[in-house]
Amino acid sequence: MLSGAAIAALAACATAPDVPTSTEPAPMPPPPPPPVAEPAPIDIDRSAGNFPDEYLELEDEFESLPPTGAGAPVIAASRTAFREASRSATPVQDYLPYIDVAIEQDILVAGNGPALQDRYTRIQIVTLDPDSYDIAGVAGDGRKSKKETRDYDKESRGWLSRTLMGSRNVTRTLIADFDISNPDIKTTKALFSSTFRSDNAKGEAWATNESISVYATPYFKVSPNTMIEGRFRMQLSDERSSSAGANVMNALQTAANLIAPTSALVTFFNAPAMLQASNFLNTQSTSLFGQSITEESTGAFAIKSWTGDPILIIRAELPPAANIKNTQKKEGIGKWVVYLEPPIPSVFTANTYGGNDDAPNFEGVSSADILSFNVGTDLRVYDYIFSRLELSDKITSLNETGDVDTARLICSRISRGLSAVGFTTFDAAAGVWAASESDQFTAAARTALQAPDTCGAMQLWAEMTE
């Protein structure tokens, strides 16, 4: 038998690692890469304005590229291709259950049609519901039947319910807001409203209102950087008291008519009234609704050229009056489209020498017609020119001397002033001519002021009236 020391020695030999018979040297690390010789910095004589030959070669390559503006069609083409690819995919579920707004990006990107810059346009909202507003059907057999109509009997409550549960007011309204920059305009329109009031004292009352076609704005001048943002919101309320009005839409429209501008053109002077009207309507709608469910969808775009196709399309649905939170039993109330009116060059005359792109034809337009045009509350073109532009001293000097330089200064100031408040260059030139025909100038001053070489406005007027 082996001793304990022998057994321990055998165990140690069994667990010891194998010792190699020959030791190989470790591989050498790779040699470092050779140093890269950095080129000497190019010394550019900035005072001389000359570039080295390498820079001149790059400059030749850059000159062969199209300018930034010419690259826009390429961007538009890529956008179009991207949208076409995205449309073939599975559509995503809209998160808003009651409002669906679509913007026609192809039209906005392509920019086809007459230019809108230095022209007037306005926003019109028209319903898309041929079953309800078909001319032949209404004129013949009356209003066509619709699959979804308001059921007054279903919304009604019995006397016992009104007595035990108290009063109830259900309000559902679709509102359109537009924010326009350059010029700064804000306007609010109610497109649809349905209310149901029920209490034990007054019984029950229903009111349903819808807009078939409305102008959201008067005419406004389009600038190179004019932007439009349209917001459409659904406001829903189920009040257990009589705090909400029985006819929300009529209340909103009445308030708008009280403080909205009366002029056919948005100017510097009446734009604040439109902002006041919009803010008032928004405040009133909040107070009328109290606790409510509000959905809002926003679309913003720049306008460069006009198209006859709609810019925005809105589809709206309503929950049942019994439960405004029930999105599973919503009912369609209609579709609306937002158009831009065809551009016009003048608000003083509808006549042109050709299409909308041509200059206006002022034949038959008197200076009194132009000077009496309202640009604000109790403010005419005449008042603005001779009271707001501070021309009294210059007019007196021109009447006494007939000086050409003084006439040029007056002409330029009137033209710039009218353009600044919202008139196109055509109407600004017409305003200068109308001012020269007024009783403020003598015959000699009028002759100096109306000369075609006096300023650009009179040159333009001569070209339009020759």
Image (tube, rainbow, N blue to C red):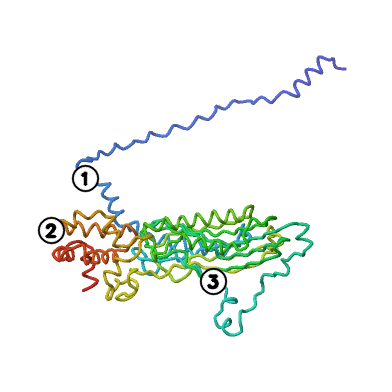
Q: Amino acid at mark 1?
A: Asn
Q: Give me the disc on residue 181.
A: none
Disc 2 designates what residue? 400
Q: Nearer the viewer, mark 2 or mark 3?
A: 2
Q: Earlier in the sequence, mark 2 or mark 3?
A: 3
Residue lying farthest to the bottom in this orientation: 140
What whole-number distance in Å separates the C-alpha atoms at marks 2 and 3? Answer: 58 Å
| Disc 1 residue crowd, few under 14, some 14–19, many 20+, Cα 10 Å | few
Q: Earlier in the sequence, mark 1 or mark 2?
A: 1
| Rendered image quadrant of residue 375 | bottom left
The percent coordinates of residue 143 (x first, y second) are 61, 79
Disc 3 designates what residue? 212
The percent coordinates of residue 305 (x first, y second) are 39, 66
Disc 1 designates what residue? 50
Q: Quadrant of the N terminus?
A: top right
The percent coordinates of residue 246 (x first, y second) are 63, 62
Q: Quadrant of the C terminus?
A: bottom left
Q: Secondary structure at mark 1?
A: loop
In the image, residue 61 sits, relative to residue 100, either above or below, namely above
Which is more toward the observer, 238 or 148?
A: 238
Which is more toward the observer, 394 or 113?
A: 394
What whole-number distance in Å separates the C-alpha atoms at marks 1 and 2? Answer: 56 Å
